[in-house]
Image (cartoon, helix red, strand yellow):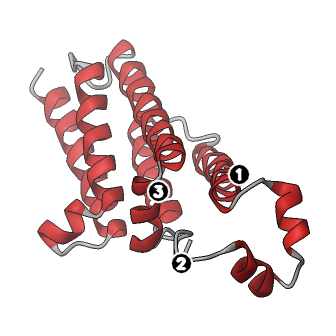
Amino acid sequence: MAEGFAPFTMEDLAVRLHCSKATLYALAPSKEQLAVTVLRHYFAGAAARVEASIAGVDDVRERIGRYLASVGTEMRMASPDLIADLEAFAPTREIYERNTRAAADRIRDFVAEGVSNDIFGDVNAAFLAEVISATLAAIQRGDVRRRTGLSDAESFTELSSLVLRALTTTTSEQ
């Protein structure tokens, strides 16, 4: 998470992890496939932790805020080097993109729930989810950090505030 995976060889990893290369090769046939395995495991755990953070939260606005904040916490662990490595290798980029789409889908579900319960008014949940998805990807790639100077955590906080303000404004205008 801190250094990415591209610069390391299996030998480097074996030394750092105090294990044999055979142990690593038992997990995956190459360094890149080991990265895929590790990242699948990381993102599955991250998704479970994010879901746990919203368990039992009935208020959909609070759920959206907590969800985005938890995604920010999880992504705070990913260094710019890791993000660059994820983007450069198609299988890890696909894992990364799939998780970003899953986060957007969860937000879409929350917004649809708020709309169906007349909490948010008439909001196009699919459009909002696409805007959030694009913003999540820009935050995770470091685009927002480079353009605004905000940390990823600050960016997730701003995104959460922006979405909740938009939903509140939509509700109060009715």
* Residue at image location 62% in from the left, 57% down from the top: 32
Above-or-below relation of 154 to 159: below
Look at the numbered discs 3 and 1 and tell me whether their residues touch, using CB distance below 8 Å.
Answer: no
Q: Quadrant of the C terminus?
A: top left
Of pointers 3 and 1, the one earlier in the residue sequence: 1
Residue 103 drawn at (x, y percent): 46, 38
Residue at label 2?
A: 2
Residue at label 3?
A: 86
Question: SS of the residue at dot 1?
Answer: helix
- Closer mark to the observer between disc 2 and disc 1: 1
Q: CA distance from mark 3 to mark 1?
A: 13 Å
Residue 21 drawn at (x, y percent): 84, 72
Q: Quadrant of residue 155?
A: bottom left
Residue type highlighted by circle 1: Thr
Q: Nearer the viewer, residue 7 or 160?
A: 7
Q: Quadrant of residue 64?
A: top left
Of pointers 3 and 2, the one earlier in the residue sequence: 2
Residue type highlighted by circle 2: Ala
Residue type highlighted by circle 3: Leu
- Closer mark to the observer between disc 3 and disc 2: 3
Residue at label 1?
A: 37
Residue 88 drawn at (x, y percent): 41, 56
